[in-house]
Amino acid sequence: MTLLAGGSDDKSISRKRKRMDVEESRMVHKRRHTLESKFLELPHDIHHIIINEFLDTADILSLAHTSNAFRYLCYDLYLQRQSVIQKNASPDIHKRRITMRINKYTPRLALLILMSSLRSNHFAQVHACLWIDLDPLYHFQNMMFNFLENSQLIVTGLSFLYTPQTLQTLSSEVPSLMMRLLASVGASCTFFYMWENPQFNAVTTTINSFGHHLDSNHINVDAIRPAMDGIVSMDLPLSFFDSPTIRTLAPHLLQGSSITSLVLSCSKTATLQDILNDVKMPAVSTMVLLVLSDVTQISFPTEFFHRHQSLQRLTLTNGCSNPVNHIAQGSILELPPLRTVTISSNYSGWRMSDQSLLASVSINPTNYRCAHNGVFCDEVRLLVGAVSQYQDTSPKFPYCLTFPGRIRNHVKLHSQNCTCFPKAHDQLAVNVHTLVLKFTRIMGTDSPLKDWVAFSSYISKWLKWFPDLKSLQITYMGPSSHTPNTELSLAQSLKYQSSKDLQTFQCGTEENYTAWYFQHDHWIPQS
């Protein structure tokens, strides 16, 4: 009987413990539920801060898979952690513009979440600048195009990146890919830029393809018209068109009724010459044409400026890293009426039919990094040669001349053998009244005063090219020369050595400069 009584007590204690455990479990569950409810009641931005601050990437993904309430917030945070979506100040994705980047380093899981795990209205009314690489575009094309066409994302800008290696490998696929991409972003896209990544960054991709690929033989030209007519700004490296197959895209990509700004860059002049015939942008007002490794002058097709009567600002520059001892004289560069012109020093002859609107002419060297003395002097003399000659009248606009780099080394080491200055047989740039000169660093930190004296002597001799100069502005990169009377001493030197008609003088860095005007035989600082 005693044993039975003892067993009964043990069972009673066990039942009590079970009831207590159940009750404790209920209390814990209730407290957890209360905490979850209170956490859910917190503002959305507080959720964002807490999850982003205290959870690592793996935990964020786990929370997304276990909580319906936080799934899409966690997906957004994960995509930001993977640099697919740029993290902005506002935590609510629906209250901001975003930058979306898809490149060959983007994890496949991030692409799958972005394109197949979000609701169709997740990006509704969200404005995005889309950066996309050719490599993932090709391998995930079907998924990407479906996402762009069905996600309600408003793509306001498109930046397309490629490596020469990938472009060559996929050349037969690129025309259809580019057409479909532009058709997918539609008329909301206002700028379209291409970027060529350096060859050394190219790697052989190991991404597996998803979905079927487009028919490379089928190109719907009409489908891209809304996008091309909505684009306002375009920047294209012409190396994109090196392949004959991709070259067929040029007439379609270089036509747009709304494009106001165009930048084209290439290595050789012949490449640009070939493309200019395809450019038809009646609204373009700013055009930048850059040839990076060829000093052969560009000549425009006969009807080019007639097709672009809205053009106001033109940049036309050639460059070359090798020494240029002589630049062959091309035909006279005939320009329409423009407001601003920037040319390189190889355009030694140019004319404008009407200069009444012209506000400035800038001339850049063809070689910014001159390796030795003779090359530097040749480049400087070419700058002067590109200034048009005015025998009877003076231009109402300023000339802005940018000197090659390493001016400090040139002045210090080669002053005795320098040929930058005019000789007896040289034709001077007469009737030029206003001049802006731009330099890189002209002084070092070790001996700034000595450097300034050497520079002052150099520029006083060089300005003899411009005997009728009345207004001069000198701008250079820091450090500033601001020691007592440094600019004043230069102004006095110029007035009595080379520019007797000089009336106004400004000198310094863009942030820190002094301006003077000459009155009653004295230089007076402007307030």
Image (tube, helix red, strand yellow):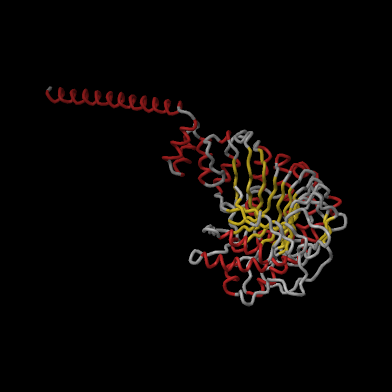
Q: Is residue 299 left or right of residue 40?
A: right
- Asked whether residue 175 appears in the rendered view, the answer is no
Residue 503 position by quadrant:
bottom right
Residue at left offset 63%, top offset 70%: 370
In-front residue for pair 492/178 = 492
Q: Is residue 276 left or right of residue 127?
A: right
Residue with the most extreme bottom position: 417
From the top left corner, tell me how far across and down residue 181 is, in percent: 70, 46
From the top left corner, tell me how far across and down residue 459 is, in percent: 64, 66
Residue at left offset 56%, top offset 50%: 106
From the top left corner, tell me how far across and down residue 101 is, in percent: 59, 47
Quarter of the image containing the N terminus?
top left
- Asked whether residue 389 appears in the rendered view, the answer is yes
From the top left corner, tell me how far across and down residue 168 is, in percent: 69, 61
In-front residue for pair 421/226 = 421
In-front residue for pair 500/61 = 500
Residue at left offset 79%, top offset 71%: 328
In-front residue for pair 312/290 = 312
Count of numbered marks: 0
Q: Is residue 481 left or right of residue 38?
A: right
